[in-house]
Amino acid sequence: MPDLICIVCPRGCRIQVDENLNVTGNFCKRGETYGRNEVTHPMRMITSTVKIKSEILVRLPVMTDRPIPKNQIFSVMEAINQAEVQAPIKIRDVVIKNVLGLGVDIVATRNVEK
Amino acid sequence: MLNYDLVIVGGGSAGIACAISAFDHGVSKILVLEKDLYLGGILLQCIHNGFGLTKYKEELTGPEYADRYINELKKRPIDFKVKTMVLKITKNLQVQFSNAIDGFQTVQARAIVMATGCSERTRGSINLSGDRVPGVLTAGLAQRYLNIDGYMVGKRVFILGSGDIGLIMARRMTLEGAKVLGVAEIMPYSNGLTRNIVQCLHDYDIPLYLHHTVKRVIGKEHLEKIIVSEVDDNLQFIPGTDREIEVDTLLLSVGLIPSIPLVENIGVKVHPKTKGPIVDESMMTNIPGIFACGNALHVHDLVDFVSLEAEKTGEKVARFIKDENAKSNREMKVTPKTGINYILPCQVNLDNTESITFNFRVNQPFSSVYLRILLNGKVIKKVKKAFMLPAEMETIELPSALLEAGVLEMEVANA
């Protein structure tokens, strides 16, 4: 199998995953999980913005609260682009509950007081 | 005239971290001046995740990282003003600023920290030839338009330069429905973090053209197409390699330069490589009482390192204000040798610090090499390095006890 570059942190370890899903070349434990997931079911975090009614901002930054399957990225983006919220908003407030039934919430990443 | 112990110019990641640390080390009257509508700086437009792994051991987005620091700042009696422009700084440590509430004001400070960040190199600074049409803009500006203001700048995009902001924007524009046709990098290696090549380009099948650059931009009312060409080892265009690409947007991610005209104008010496000020072990410039940290000092890859450096600077500024600095001077000059692009700080008073953290960058990619540190010609430390890349800042901490007056050199040597 080809070498992978771990994207868990900026260290960017070059890792190898063999047929039995043994991971080598990783510096930390999270690299092991990443390597195994990457060859079986790659997952990614998504960050974007949604419309917000507020006195200060027009866009509220949001993210998936957990990684989603890589092949669902564009469907999730469509759902994010439909959403609109009203200030006040706090970091981690849920903007979309259980997006597309994936068991993942879209949450706010910025406090907006008014 | 207002009076403050410390005036910090810039309320982004460096300015906030420096203010908190200076306060915690005993500086009581601190003023932070920020030109934007809110504290937080560029972090607020960096909505992607990946911040805070070093500092907080968790993966935060830019606005979340900023929020933690802003909260810490607000817990302390530190004054700050937003929508405030600093107009002038003088050698005797006066700061002139203006805003809609206070009008024009002058502050007498005992120390000033430049935490003004950096600015993006533009079309002019790379002599990009062709028509002067809308549609050519810097990646960070496009990021602000998209993430803060909610505007897409184009639908068919090409990116010149493989810096991290360019890579992040390649993914961001793709997610929002644009077609990103490629990224060109004039050097034979990428200038961004490896993880960003993977998660921003490979994930979306965006090609990276190494040893390529944009030769010409073409358009009448708006950008219509660009000519991308391959370059040779001397960075000259190779004839016959031109390819025409139809685009409505060209984003430039061609480097960042510390933004310090306010102090450059009054005689702060500028480092030829970093383009930021030349500083000593306290992050102090050649004008006593004027300090710099964060991207105003040298461009960092990760905000975590900005925070750590700014916190250290806050501590050093506190020592300066409280007049606790050593009166003696055992000076050690710091010089980059083979393979090293720059090292900060440039000179160190060994009497003034127990240990020194050196930040440096190599000038080309290296693998399986040694980093060698020489003091007055003798090797005092050898560190094995599996990889070193120009895009990734390296750090090494040395105790002052190991050092002596003279010249410290760093070089890359074969294993």
Image (cartoon, helix red, strand yellow):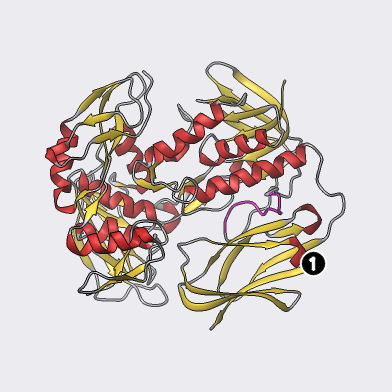
- Magenta segment range? B274-282
Relative to A64, does residue B246 appear above or below in the rendering?
below
Image coords of residue B397 (percent x, y): 64, 61
**What residue is drawn where x is 67% and y is 31%?**
B95
Front-most of A69 and B269? A69
Residue B373 image offset from top left, x and y in percent: 66, 73
Q: Which residue is found at the position 47% from the left and 45% from the top? A: B56
Q: Give the crowd class for mark 1: few <14, some 14-19, many >=20 residues within 10 Å.
A: some
Nearer the observer, A77 or B383: B383
- Whether B277 is among the magenta residues is yes
Relative placement, left or right, of A37 versus B333 is: left
Q: Residue at the far bottom: name it.
A: B415
Q: Is residue B216 magenta?
A: no
Residue B231 is left or right of residue B221, and the answer is right
| Quarter residue B360 falls in | bottom right
Q: What amino acid is found at the position of numbered circle 1 in the picture?
A: Glu
